[in-house]
């Protein structure tokens, strides 16, 4: 894949080159990269088990024979966020309590079903187990015959699940889009071990959940971190590695959400694939404002965007079918978005209002469920903000940032609404095109008014498709207005990156839908020009050729965009430390038992070691311990750090970053003092060694064996040292 990307002129614009990131050679590179790849595989497998396989056992299917993948993801995501928040608040959060909560949820849903708890089925299943056990004890079971029947049943099931040839081709193309999208989002993590300043807070909050602490620095949306924490409970991954891998997981999830929504609203695979490609791949061409979301901005914003479009799909289906299951899914999706990111939750709420407006535009009789929708929307807002209210009642303040500013939107809107807005001035060509093609979504597609009779279910599906298309069009128009209206004085309320990212996501969706409508009109025009009536077999063959032709056109468009479009640029995010420090801390965690080691250094190393080891600030260490009197005495910890291993991180060249610019001189003085301390201690003791060193960083290792070599003698002290 890397070779293929290089062939299409993928330009990598990073802060440092690969050889400077991994100065010790290929062994370090392969070890770090291998750990990320293994972590990525474990994360994907457990995500599939927890959010796709497990919900199939807990929740009933929305409709028999229909794909329920995103319904299960939304439902399981909603309940997981609620469960983790509650378990952390009551102080019993761990793997076993999480598994027990899932089991209780399953039993609760069984009791709430209209038919009640299926005791008859349970008794029948228990009886079968008892009878089988008795037969096995009496040796009346033919295990060979039993295995043969099971194998035949498995082969029959596999035969029913085998997709058609065109489905395989479309699936491979979609898989390619997902893999490239994930690779582009993981490129930064694969080439840089250091974290961004924002990641320090994210890592701290993720580890705080494991320690049963909520809102450690103030109120902030913890929804994304609760989902990752649930994955961490099952994968047992280091939180820092999980956060790096989560960038690719969340990016792939959002691309899949775009594909799912466009597939539903357009009815065409090619439109869904192109829209997903625009967001997942071609956003790296720097042609969309606010995209792509780089590692210091992807969480939790991009995870909230992943749940946004599926929520609107469920909302459109409720308007079309009036089934409570779709309204429940829309409620759960909206509450989940609020819990992950309040600003995107406001966007989701706007979608509810515009969806009802879209229902009035296309089918007045479909807007009869608006009272139920209003109650569900109000309930989603309450449920999605309940934990923020709990934090405020506990005396917590909002963390400074865009989520906190979202709470100030409504009052300021009324104050600024009287000002005349400036004319919309699109900032990119693609964004301008999206606004131009938006009116196309208000027009009927070629299948909306088909003359041939159709079942009532397909008529309802057409209304769902219409409502979804018009909702997206209306939301994009509103988002574009707000994006440009920031010059009215709303800039401090809408972080430019936030508003631009949401608007660009909608632009990708609108462009994909517009292509689908144009393609359907062209296909309808072709059918009318041909006017040939064929037999069923010929019609089937023509349909297959049409699918293959549509796939071929899609591949040609993707290839043309890759060759003729802007080059894909992966920019490196701003760091706060050297990559070598992060790499070596990861090695230290792998080499030693937890809490048997201490790291002395700048505050940037603290998030790496939370929950695994001890940390001492460099200034405190210098003020407390003297190299002349420092020695290991468990009975007198004031003489030394009371752990077996002590690592002192010294920056020979202070890392210049925006987060450290104000205290650069102070940090330089501290680092020089640490270096002098270690060299002075080295002259008097033989239990200190250099663990790692390059031109920028040196890490000293002081080893205190737990048992002395001779009675009454402290090991590691030279003859001329202290006794």
Image (tube, rainbow, N blue to C red):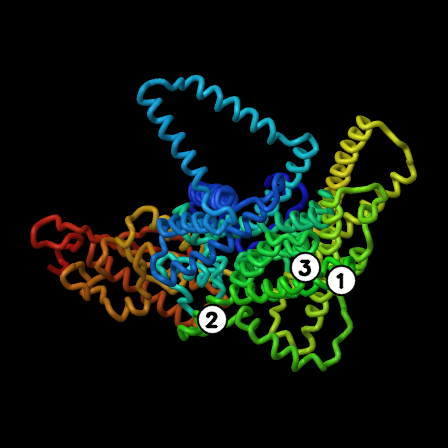
Looking at the rendered image, the quarter that the C terminus falls into is bottom left
Q: Find disc 2 in the rendering and name its residue.
A: 389
Look at the numbered disc 2 and give the secondary structure of its residue: helix
Q: Residue at x 58, y 54 (%)?
A: 329
Q: Can you name the residue that lies furthest to the left here?
A: 711
Q: Is residue 373 shown left or right of residue 214?
A: right
Q: Is residue 319 above or below residue 553?
A: below
Depth check, front residue: 353 or 554: 353
x and y percentages locating residue 176 in the rendered image: 63, 40
Depth check, front residue: 458 or 161: 458
Q: Tell me how far mark 2 sits from mark 3, CA to CA.
A: 31 Å
Q: Which of pointers 1 and 2 lies earlier in the amino acid sequence?
A: 1
Q: Which of pointers 1 and 3 lies earlier in the amino acid sequence?
A: 1
- Mark 3 burial class by Cα count in 10 Å: few <14, some 14-19, many 20+: many
Q: Is residue 332 shown left or right of residue 363?
A: left
Q: Find disc 1 in the rendering and name its residue.
A: 360
Q: Is residue 539 shown left or right of residue 569?
A: right
Q: Find disc 3 in the rendering and name its residue.
A: 504
């Amino acid at each position: 894949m890397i070779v293929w990307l290089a062939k299409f002129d993928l330009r990598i614009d990073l802060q440092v080159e690969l050889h400077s990131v991994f100065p010790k050679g290929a062994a370090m590179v392969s070890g770090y990269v291998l750990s990320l790849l293994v972590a990525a595989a474990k994360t994907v497998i457990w995500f599939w088990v927890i959010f796709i396989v497990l919900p199939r056992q807990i929740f009933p299917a929305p409709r028999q024979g229909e794909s329920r993948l995103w319904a299960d993801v939304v439902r399981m995501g909603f309940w997981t966020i609620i469960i983790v928040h509650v378990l952390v608040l009551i102080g019993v959060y761990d793997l076993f309590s999480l598994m027990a909560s899932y089991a209780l949820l399953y039993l609760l849903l069984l009791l709430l079903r209209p038919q009640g708890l299926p005791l008859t089925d349970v008794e029948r299943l228990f009886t079968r187990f008892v009878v089988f056990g008795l037969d096995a004890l009496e040796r009346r079971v033919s295990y060979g015959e039993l295995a043969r029947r099971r194998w035949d049943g498995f082969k029959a099931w596999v035969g029913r699940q085998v997709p058609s040839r065109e489905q395989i081709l479309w699936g491979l193309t979609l898989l390619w889009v997902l893999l490239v999208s994930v690779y582009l989002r993981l490129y930064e993590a694969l080439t840089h071990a250091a974290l961004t300043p924002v990641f320090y807070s994210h890592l701290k909050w993720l580890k705080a959940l494991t320690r049963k602490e909520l809102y450690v620095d103030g109120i902030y949306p913890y929804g994304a971190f609760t989902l990752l924490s649930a994955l961490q409970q099952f994968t047992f991954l280091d939180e820092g590695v999980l956060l790096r891998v989560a960038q690719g997981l969340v990016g792939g999830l959002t691309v899949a959400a775009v594909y799912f929504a466009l597939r539903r609203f357009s009815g065409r695979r090619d439109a869904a694939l192109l829209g997903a490609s625009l967001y997942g791949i071609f956003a790296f061409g720097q042609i969309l404002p606010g995209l792509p979301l780089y590692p210091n901005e992807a969480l939790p914003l991009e995870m909230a965007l992943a749940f946004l479009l599926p929520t609107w799909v469920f909302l459109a289906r409720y308007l079309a079918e009036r089934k409570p299951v779709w309204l429940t899914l829309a409620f759960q999706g909206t509450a989940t978005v609020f819990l992950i990111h309040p600003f995107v939750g406001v966007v989701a709420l706007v979608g509810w209002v515009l969806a009802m407006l879209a229902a009035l535009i296309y089918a007045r009789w479909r807007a009869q469920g608006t009272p139920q929708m209003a109650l569900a929307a109000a309930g989603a807002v309450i449920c999605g903000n309940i934990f923020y209210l709990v934090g405020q009642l506990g005396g917590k303040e909002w963390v400074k940032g865009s989520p906190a500013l979202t709470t100030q939107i409504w009052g300021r809107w009324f104050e600024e609404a009287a000002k005349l807005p400036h004319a919309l001035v699109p900032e990119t060509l693609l964004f301008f095109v999206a606004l131009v093609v938006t009116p196309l979504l208000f027009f009927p597609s070629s299948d909306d008014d088909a003359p041939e009779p159709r079942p009532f279910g397909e008529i309802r599906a057409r209304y769902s498709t219409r409502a979804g298309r018009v909702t997206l069009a209306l939301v994009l128009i509103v988002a574009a207005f707000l994006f440009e209206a920031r010059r009215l004085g709303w800039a401090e309320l809408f972080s430019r990156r936030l508003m631009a990212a949401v608007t660009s996501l909608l632009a990708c969706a609108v462009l994909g839908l517009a292509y689908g409508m144009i393609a359907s009109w062209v296909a309808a025009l072709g059918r009318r020009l041909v006017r040939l009536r064929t037999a069923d077999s010929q019609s089937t063959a023509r349909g297959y050729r049409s699918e293959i032709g549509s796939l071929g056109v899609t591949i040609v468009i993707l290839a043309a965009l890759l060759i003729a479009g802007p080059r894909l640029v992966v920019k490196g995010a701003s760091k706060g430390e050297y990559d070598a420090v992060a790499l070596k801390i990861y090695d230290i965690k792998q080499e030693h038992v937890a809490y048997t080691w201490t790291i002395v250094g700048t505050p940037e190393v603290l998030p790496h070691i939370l929950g695994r080891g001890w940390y001492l600030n460099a200034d405190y260490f210098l003020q407390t311990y003297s190299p002349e009197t420092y020695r290991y005495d468990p009975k007198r910890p004031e003489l030394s750090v009371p752990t077996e291993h002590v690592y002192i991180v010294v920056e020979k060249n202070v890392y210049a970053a925006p987060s450290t610019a104000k205290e650069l001189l102070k940090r330089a003085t501290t680092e020089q003092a640490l270096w002098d301390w270690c060299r002075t201690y080295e002259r008097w003791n033989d239990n200190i060694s250099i663990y790692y060193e390059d031109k920028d960083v040196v890490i000293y290792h002081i080893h205190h064996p737990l048992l002395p070599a001779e009675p009454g003698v402290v090991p590691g002290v030279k003859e001329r040292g202290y006794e």
